[in-house]
Amino acid sequence: MPEEPCQCPDCQRFYREHDRLIRENPTLRQQQELSWAALQSFRTLAGRVLEDLQKTQPEGETALAAAASSASGPVEAGDQEAMAQALADLENINAHLFSIEALMERIFDVRVPEAVEQKFRELAGELAPDPLNADRLRLNRLLHQTPDLPG
Ligand SMILES: [Zn+2]
C-alpha cells in the first residue's frame, strides 16, 4: 500500500493550490503562461527590493566594516550583519531566477497541436477534478463511508 501523503495544514494548502493551478490552467499553453507570469512577477519584485535596499547600504563598505566603524551599539551591528546576509541571499535568488528564465524560454517556445492540448485538458480533469463537481462529491461520500462489518 502506498504511503499516505502528509496531511499537515501546509501540505494540504499545497495540494489544494496544486490542484487549482491544474484545474484553472488545463493546457500546455496555459501552464506555460502561468509559469512565465509567476517567474516574471517574482523577478520584478525581488529585483526591485534588492535595488531599493542596496541604495540604503553604505557605499563600498561591508556590513561588518560599517558596523565596526559606526558608533552604534552591538544590537545595530547585528542588524547590519543580518541585512548584509539578506542582500547576499537576494542577489543569489535573482541570479537563480535569471538562470531559470533562460531555461524556461526553451520550454515556452514549444507549441503543440490541438489534439495534444485536448489530451492535457482531459488528464487535467482527471488529476484535479472540480471539488464542487457532483460526481466528485458523490465519490467522496462513498469513500468516507465506513464499510459494513460482516455478520
Ligand atoms: Zn506536511
Image (cartoon, grey):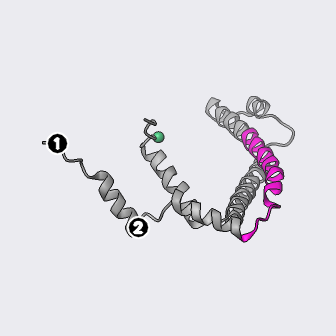
**Residue 150: assigned label:** 1
Q: Quadrant of residue 78?
A: top right
Residue most toward the left? 151
Residue most toward the front? 151
Quarter of the picture containing the C terminus is: top left
**Residue 63: assigned label:** none
Lateral position of residue 53 relative to residue 8, left or right: right
Residue in view at x 67 percent, y 36 percent: 82
Q: Amino acid at mark 1?
A: Pro
**Residue 132: assigned label:** 2
Residue in view at x 53 percent, y 63 percent: 125
The nearer-to-camera label among 2 and 1 is 1
Q: What is the C-alpha distance between the residues marked 2 and 1?
A: 33 Å
> What range of the chain is rendered magenta?
87-114
Q: Nearer the viewer, residue 91 or 57?
A: 91
Quarter of the picture containing the N terminus is: top left
Judge the density around disc 1: few (<14), some (14-19), many (≥20) Cα neighbours within 10 Å: few
Q: Is mark 1 within 8 Å of ligand 1?
A: no
Q: Is residue 111 magenta?
A: yes
- Secondary structure of residue under mark 2: loop
Lateral position of residue 75 relative to residue 135, left or right: right
Lateral position of residue 103 relative to residue 5, left or right: right
Q: Amino acid at mark 2?
A: Leu
- Secondary structure of residue under mark 1: loop
Of helix, strand and loop, which mostly describes the magenta segment? helix
Asked if residue 129 can be seen in this view, the reply is yes
Q: Nearer the viewer, residue 87 or 46?
A: 46
Which percent across, then down, holds residue 35? Answer: 69, 58
Q: Is residue 69 magenta?
A: no
Judge the density around disc 2: few (<14), some (14-19), many (≥20) Cα neighbours within 10 Å: few
